[in-house]
Image (cartoon, rainbow, N blue to C red):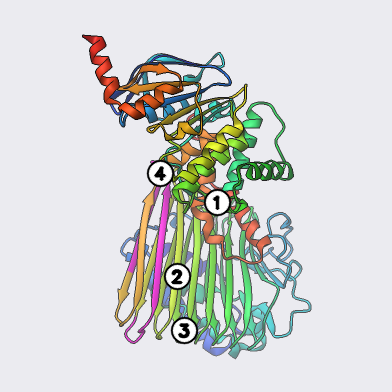
Amino acid sequence: MLSITNLHVRVAGKEILKGLSLEVAAGEVHAIMGPNGAGKSTLGYVLAGREGYEVTAGSVVYQGEDLLALPPEQRAARGVFLAFQYPVEIPGVNNTYFLRAALNAQRRARGEAELDSMQFLKRVREKLRVLHISDELLHRAVNEGFSGGEKKRNEIFQMAVLEPQLAILDETDSGLDIDALKLVADGVNKLRDPARAFVVITHYQRLLDYIVPDRVHVLDQGRIVQSGDKDLALKLEDQGYAWIRERQLAGAA
Amino acid sequence: MNAFVRSQLDAATRPAQSAPGWLHELREAARLGAEATGLPGPRDEAWKYTQLKALQSLSPVVGDPDAGERAVALDGLLLDGVTGPRLVFLNGTFRPDLSRLAELPTGVDLRPLAAVLDREPERARVAFANGDDEHGVGLAQLNTALASDGVWLHIAPGTLVEQPIHLVFAGAETGSDLAWHLRHAITLGAGASATVVEQHVGLAESAQFGNIVESLRIGARASLRHVRLQQSPLAATLVSRSSARLDVDSVLESVALELGAGLSRRDVQVLLEGSGASLDARGATALRGRQHADSHYEVRHIARDTRCDVRWRGIADDRARAVFGGTIVVEVGADGSDARLSNKNLLLSPHAEIDTRPVLEIHADEVKAAHGATVGRLDDNALFYLRSRGVPEVQARTMLTYAFCADVLSGVEPESLRAQLGARLAAHLPQQSEVDA
């Protein structure tokens, strides 16, 4: 589904990703772990198409297409979703209105019929019920005045409504207490599907107790330096990132 | 700057000699005054950002002699659901056939001012009470000299008017440049309550110059909700000056959308004369092309425990220019007053211009006051967030632009009116045609 090869990315003149490669197949959950400043969020933004991220080398092929050639909205229409680490507050734009506009824009781009307000509301109510989220969220402006936990939950809710093919979760666990964390993980698990892939970016192993990954990758200094199964996350938790650095140094010597 | 004034005075037929003596004298004095003063120019501080130079190249006809019979299709231009009494002026001339004045609610006196001047001239004095002072004095004098009609709305004490009263100023093509001058007097007696919807529409392609002077009196405990939707044609220059006097515990809630006209200038002066008087003034201007809109508020807290909240949003795209001036003065003795002023602006093009000047003067004690003005651009983070969810860039920009200004409509009732104003505002927002594909 997603094939990243030797990706080099520069932000404000500084190289952040330095030859990152990653293969994600449909149905899989990949965890990307790494210390602060490793380039985790940069990876998420580059995949979603944020401006200001200059790809100097490498490629990203998504479902057989050059993902980097597409503007953000077309990536979304093809099923790419980024759950933001810091969801943006947008005063004056109603959550429901925004989500319906987004869903229908995606459907238009895919040549599907738009949902009328009844159909849309039915879908929204169903997702709210499954995710145990109050419908009070619908009446508010996008993320405005939301607590950290509410913002993250809203990201998961949007993901559930938009039903992406490839969901990238950028530190969705940061700042959450254990109950909120379980709720978010529960939301993701309900969406796991043989046709859908997840890239879960996280600093801590904690989230992976609840979203069990197929593969775990360690990102450090702009590259994947270690890959393994879910046990790698436990080892990292136990030994810290210094352990990876030491191994790298040993390997280089 | 006097050539235009002189040409207007020369072009106009002098209002009928049947005018009451006091008005005749007032007009003669105003005529001399206007000739001496001329139009406001670069020397006038209050007109620093708005030049009327373009008027000098015009010598428009004053009044449209055929306005009474001119065919005009107002359907589709007028707001729906404003089902109450209606007064329509076409090219500055009262049109009884387009108005709705039959079966006015008890206590509502809605007529053209000319009818009052004709039958009860003494009552009409209120319309000419305080137009000639301060800003844009030449324009107000010109209005006094030439205006012989306008809106007369008098609501008797204690009258609660349910249906919104619709005041319509429509422009239609005449084949030549045209000027008109109107004088309005709106009075609410003690304890009265009413909603007025003022709408400027038009289809004319020739230049039109409209000059309005309005006097509002709001009696003790009375409340007026005033909605203004200005969608004059691009060829129009519209200047208006409104002075409101608020008595004890009265309320003025004003909402204005300035979307039309090539050049518009609106001065709103509000005198909070009675203790407990309250003003909520909201509004937005959204401009594109080479439009220029200048909105000036001057609020004077004269009595104690008065409050005002002025909230204005400006949006300028292309080569448009949006100007806002907001002055709040808390006078000596107006203790315990609460004054708020906020002006936020959105600059959508590198060639557009925004000028804002909030001023707060406090001469009293125990006053709560806050004021602020900002000029910014659309938030890139918000734009990316919307696009990352699949909203195309053009739509995302429009969504954010609308969100920036739509809150000025939040208090408008009924909801159907609010929805229509929202739709008119949205339809006028910059098309974002210059967005990179």
Image quarter for residue A160? Answer: top right
Task: Decide: few, some or many residues near mark 2? Use Cα within 10 Å; few <14, some 14-19, many ≥20.
Answer: many
Choose the circle earlier in sequence order: 3 or 2. Answer: 3
Task: Name the residue carrying label 2.
Answer: B309
Please tell me whether mark 2 sits on a helix, a strand or a loop.
strand
- Chain letter, disc 3 residue: B
Work out how far the residue at label 3 is from the one at label 4, CA to CA, in angstroms.
47 Å
Work out how far the residue at label 2 is from the one at label 1, CA to CA, in angstroms.
31 Å
Under mark 1, the amino acid is Leu
Quadrant in the picture for the C terminus of chain A: top left
Task: Name the residue carrying label 4.
Answer: A175
Choose the circle earlier in sequence order: 2 or 1. Answer: 1
Task: Name the residue carrying label 1.
Answer: B234
Q: Which numbered disc, 2 or 1, marks the residue closer to the eye?
A: 2
Q: Is residue B345 magenta?
A: yes
- Chain letter, disc 2 residue: B
Q: Looking at the image, which residue is at 50% across and 65% down?
A: B282
Q: Looking at the image, which residue is at 39% across and 58% down?
A: B50
Q: Could you tell me if the residues under marks 2 and 1 are in contact, i.e. CB atoms within 8 Å? A: no
Under mark 4, the amino acid is Gly
Task: Name the residue carrying label 3.
Answer: B276
Instruction: Name the spot of residue A228 as percent of width and height, x first.
Output: 42, 17
Task: Decide: few, some or many residues near mark 4? Use Cα within 10 Å; few <14, some 14-19, many ≥20.
Answer: few
Work out how far the residue at label 3 is from the one at label 2, CA to CA, in angstroms.
14 Å
- Respond whether the residues carrying marks 3 and 4 are from the same subunit: no
Please tell me whether mark 4 sits on a helix, a strand or a loop.
loop
Please tell me whether mark 1 sits on a helix, a strand or a loop.
loop
In the image, the segment drawn in magenta is B331-359
- Chain letter, disc 1 residue: B
- Respond whether the residues carrying marks 2 and 4 are from the same subunit: no
